[in-house]
Image: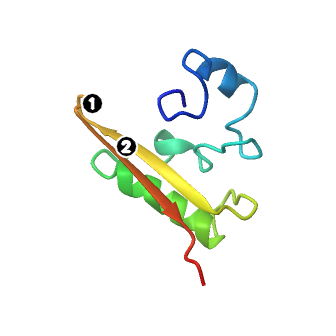
Amino acid sequence: MEDLGFCKKGAGGKFVETGKISIDGEIPVNTTGGLKAGGHPVGATGVRQIIDIVRQLRGDSCNQLKNPEYGMNLNVGGSGATAVVNVFGKEMK
């Protein structure tokens, strides 16, 4: 949360403790329980994260947010030498 800029350095613990990442918080995180809740599909973790985001944006997630406009995933691979961030938004019609 700190490195992504959602809170100041050193404030991540308090940010999480105060519920800001809960499903009804300011920045909901892991709305379907995160990767471990899905069996942690090593090698496919980024895909799993993206599926959760797409379901939220389509409005058919098992823990649906109220009208999300965008979603983001961060996937760090292996030793941490690889990191990928994707940002998704709803299609404008």
Disc 2 target residue? 75
Q: How many badges with numbers are in the image?
A: 2
Q: Is residue 4 left or right of residue 77?
A: right
Q: Residues within 10 Å of mark 1 (few under 14, many from 20)?
A: few
Residue occupying image coordinates x 68% and y 56%: 63
93, 14: nearer the viewer: 93
In the rendered image, residue 28, in percent from the top left (x then y), is placed at 66, 45
Q: Is residue 23 above or below residue 64?
A: above
Q: Is residue 36 left or right of residue 92?
A: left
Query: Which kind of residue does numbered mark 1 sit on?
Result: Gly
Quarter of the image holding residue 58?
Answer: bottom right
Q: Is residue 7 above or below residue 74?
A: above
Q: Quadrant of the C terminus?
A: bottom right
Q: Give the spatial CA distance, label 1 vs label 2.
A: 9 Å
Query: Which kind of residue does numbered mark 2 sit on?
Result: Asn
Q: Secondary structure at mark 1?
A: loop
Q: Is residue 22 above or below residue 52?
A: above
Disc 1 target residue? 80
